[in-house]
Amino acid sequence: MPYTVTIRVSSKVTRRRVPSLDDAIDVLELELRALGSSVKRAPAKAFKREIAPVAQVSARGELRGPGRVRAKVQAGVDVRGDGSFEAYRGKVSREVIAPQRRETAFDALRRALAE
């Protein structure tokens, strides 16, 4: 199966393999939405700075495939500390995918990967 969906919440990592990109995005959405309010965070302090929940990543869902070392698709969705979602593409340097009007982060990811 060519696509791997990886969900990271704290130190817990789960992986699932699915046959198509559409299935991978569907699994990603189901898994991340199922986390619900369990990933919400309070403001944190680091080096005398307060970090707002929206600036914290509580969970990350990654898509990879097809291929092993140099996969064609490397993208995902971050769950922010306030419960919002943010789609991105890239592995090392992430590029945020801005949602268009009335589009969820998962719809934006699907649109960007279809281009």
Image: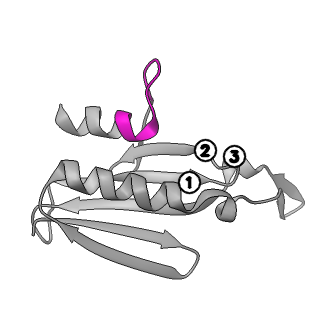
Q: Nearer the viewer, residue 20 or 86?
A: 20
Query: Which residue lies at the image location 28% right of the left edge and 38% below the top edge?
Result: 110
Residue 79 tag number: 1
Secondary structure under badge 2?
loop
Q: Is residue 110 left or right of residue 38?
A: left
Q: Is residue 83 left or right of residue 98?
A: right
Q: Nearer the viewer, residue 74 or 27?
A: 27
- Label 2 crowd (10 A; few <14 / some 14-19 / many >=20): some
| Amino acid under disc 3 | Val
In which quadrant is the N terminus drawn? Answer: bottom left
Residue 107 tag number: none
Task: Give the x, y percent position of residue 50.
Answer: 85, 54
Q: Is residue 53 above or below residue 112?
A: below
Dot 3 corresponds to which residue? 54
Q: Quadrant of residue 37?
A: bottom right
Dot 2 corresponds to which residue? 84
Q: Earlier in the sequence, mark 1 or mark 3?
A: 3
Query: Which residue lies at the image location 56% right of the left edge and 54% below the top edge?
Result: 79
Work out how far the residue at label 2 is from the one at label 1, CA to CA, in angstroms.
6 Å
| Amino acid under disc 1 | Val
Give the foreground label among 1 and 3: 1
Magenta region: 99-108
- Say if mark 2 contacts mark 1, CB within 8 Å: yes
Tell me if residue 59 can be seen: yes
